[in-house]
Image (tube, rainbow, N blue to C red):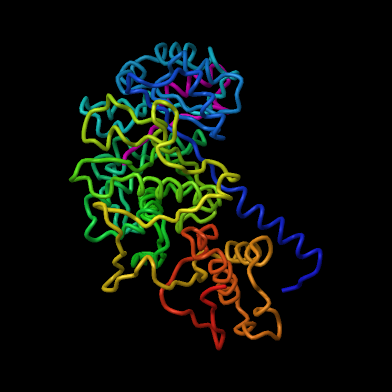
Amino acid sequence: MKHTIFSIFITFLISLATFSDGGSVGVNYGRIANNLPSATKVTNLLKTHGLTRVKVYDSDPTVLKSLSNTDIKVTIDLPNELLVSAAKSQAFATSWVRQNVVAYHPSTQIEAIAVGNEVFVDPKKTTRFLVPAMQNVHNALVKFNLHRVIKVSSPIALSALQNSYPASSGSFKPELIGSVIRPMLDFLRQTGSDLMVNAYPFFAYEANSDVIPLDYALFRPNPGMVDAGNGLRYFSLFDAQIDAVFAAMSALKYDDVNIIVTETGWPSKGDVSEIGASVENAASYNGNLVRRVLTGGGTPLRPKADLTVYLFALFNENQKFGPTSERNYGLFYPDEKKVYDVPFTVEGLKSYRDGRAPVTGGRRVSTPVGNMTVSVNGQTWCVANKDAGKDKLQGGLDYACGEGGADCHPIQPGSTCYDPNTLEAHASFAFNSYYQKKGRVGGTCFFGGAGYVVTQPPRFGKCEFPTGY
């Protein structure tokens, strides 16, 4: 490592690119409630909190007008009940696009159309109409010369997968592949669109809390889990779920189609049987998710693909059916006060700390990993994940030793921890120095997915890793 003025400057630029130019966070604006603020107030709320992407479940004129002349990008929805009409009639699809897109764009920055929502689980059995409807909507965009700036897709639920664990075994349900999955992926490939996916680690944790560590579900420090199928180490259930979809697409030879996460969230309240639903856990999940997305990097299977993620949802919606959790996914109460405090921007991340212990059933918990238990209050170290790749390791090392303020003198040539002279060893020392200096606060060992927490003292040659400053 050369510590010239020029190299320090380059290090600074790399660190900015690595930790400031990451993915994108949006929010779902659902309106199944009778006590929500006006659309104008909602637009002001989005602007106040730096939210620059919003997804709505229809194309309400009041909402679209309120979002005009802002920097907020909008995804609108053609509801499931219109799928049959849009599929059977090009004239209907063209008229719908004229009334709901052309009438507002570009003053309202509509960037995508979600044709239906989780159509495969729609009890009205509209699956066979999905791709024809998508094609007709796209044809209409072509007619109005909007197809290059507005993309068409459709959100699928993880229930579309036959297998999702481990991630490497991800596969679509056989009965869906020929009828809709392949035609839809062909359409997305041809139009340069992303597959929209709704992913909820909460559901998996709720149903399997005896085997899924809560820290793993909440993006909190944990030793990770190795996927025996691909050898990759996962540090969050969210990443594993997304990679299961990537693996399912890869099995069908659609590695060139990307994913956009159109829904994900965690409820702040639930019924007694809804294990893990709490304000503390919702704050941890969404706050750590925002940090994970905005600091950049993809999943272990697609490490270079930054993610766009839409949080669910903007408000608690008091007229939704189902268990208590359904009415408590909101980031805000209807009076516009935050349900809990999480950041939505890179600037907000600078002061964000997830210092709370994960909560389930009203008690602090430790996280089972294999046949040992890692206390959330025990001594931990941060090391480099060599599977993250050289670019991420080098970017993390540069950031830690530069802007991050880690003590990197011991890994200079001739110093005590220079040997072994490997990127993994040097990055591990730098990551740990940064992690310890930050008080081992949750998220300070992320480094864009290049770092992870261990509970045993790391060993690289004769170098001893510090445990605190």
Please determine whether, in this image, residue 333 is positioned above or below residue 345.
above
**Residue that lies at the very extreme toward the bottom in this rendered image:** 462
In front: 200, or 342?
342
Q: Is residue 226 left or right of residue 6?
A: left
Counting from the top left corner in percent of width and height, residue 91 is at: 42, 11
Quadrant housing residue 286: top left
Q: Quadrant of the C terminus?
A: bottom right
Q: Position of residue 65 (x, y in %)?
A: 52, 15
Q: Looking at the image, is 406 positioned above or below residue 210?
A: below
Q: Which residues are magenta?
A: 134-157
- In this picture, residue 207 sits left or right of residue 49: left
Location of residue 345 in the rendering, given as x and y in whole percent from the top left corner: 56, 42
Residue occupying the point 19% across, 44% down: 272
Position of the N terminus by quadrant: bottom right
Residue ID at (60%, 24%): 70
Residue nearest the observer in this picture, 149 or 300: 300
Residue 328's x, y, as percent? Answer: 31, 35
